[in-house]
Image: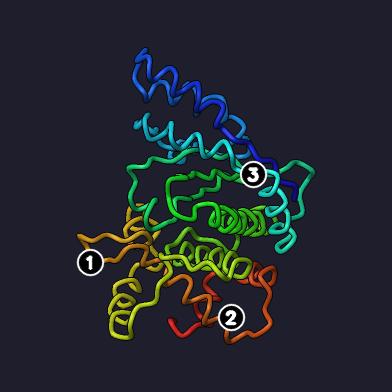
Amino acid sequence: MSVKIIATFKNVEEYISCAERGEVSVEELWDKHMIRPFWPEITKWAPFDQSFKKPPCVRDITSLDKQLSILSGIPFTNLESNFRNTTKALPLEDDGEPMSVFFYPACDSDKTLKEQQNGVVGAVVFGNIIIRINPLADDYQKWIPYVFAHEYHHNVWGYNHFVLHGGKHTDGSFLEYMITEGQADLFAESLFPQLIPRWNRPFDGDRETALWERIKPILSDTDPETHEAYMFGDENKGLPWCVGYSFGRMIVIDFMRKHRGLSFPELLEIPPRLIYEGSKFA
């Protein structure tokens, strides 16, 4: 799988210039300069609407101007080489078309992204990837390859289960969601073991047991709002930040410990429910 990097930062300059003149609302300008020029390419393989994945408007122009001076200096040649190494670690048979990775700036006001996610977050759009960056965050450059590896794994997992196997082992459940996130993080960690994501922290024994008792009843749930709360956390419901990510990783780790030598390409072939049933959490 070849990778093509597309940076949107030239368009950011135009967006900032127009926003400073106050011609129309920043939301309209963001759509004009940052979404419409790229969205057809980003979603070219999507079978249904992906509007909910559009990069959110960055309204703080002063902060964005500071970000742009840093973002323009990102060594994309080095990133392309790094990304190619990741694709070799988990090969994906393709038809010759490259996977496109679109780089966008992120809102500096998003404190969770800046302080807890190292300023870098990604999303997959049916074969392509969006990576949003806040370069005002500490060590953001270290985390770009990690986030790419995580999102790339999602693309390979999706291709394997939906294209090659017709979705016969998928059900859209919360369990499936957790398992896929756990696999993606462990794959990224295998390539970048020096990086420790804050969202994948362990819980002590009693806390782990109590939280798992909360999660078990919704494993088969397919409701997106429920998924949101249990994957990313909801303080109002007593669910800590990114609790679903933590348990997804723990389930996959336990399964792999019981199947020593299992490679990530081999793990892709195993239905999520079998991974869960082969772990201590079942």
- SS category of the residue bearing label 3: loop
- For marks 2 and 3, the one nearer the N-term is 3
Give the number of the mark in front: 1 or 3: 3
- Amino acid on which the number 2 mark rests in the picture: Met
Give the residue number, with chain letter if any, for mark 3: 75
Residue 236 drawn at (x, y percent): 20, 60
Residue 254 drawn at (x, y percent): 52, 82
Real-space Cα separation, disc 1 to disc 3, in angstroms? 42 Å
- For marks 1 and 3, the one nearer the N-term is 3
Question: In the drawing, what numbered circle is on residue 121?
Answer: none
Badge 3: how crowded within 10 Å, few (<14), some, or many (20+)? few
**Where's the C terminus, which quadrant?**
bottom left
Q: Is residue 205 left or right of residue 276?
A: left
Vertical comparison of 8 with 255: above or below: above
Real-space Cα separation, disc 2 to disc 3, in angstroms? 35 Å
Give the number of the mark in front: 2 or 3: 3
Question: In the drawing, what numbered circle is on residue 238?
Answer: 1
Give residue 55's quadrant in the image: top left
Question: In the drawing, what numbered circle is on residue 256?
Answer: 2
Residue 261 drawn at (x, y percent): 68, 82
Seen at 37% across and 12% down, the residue is 23
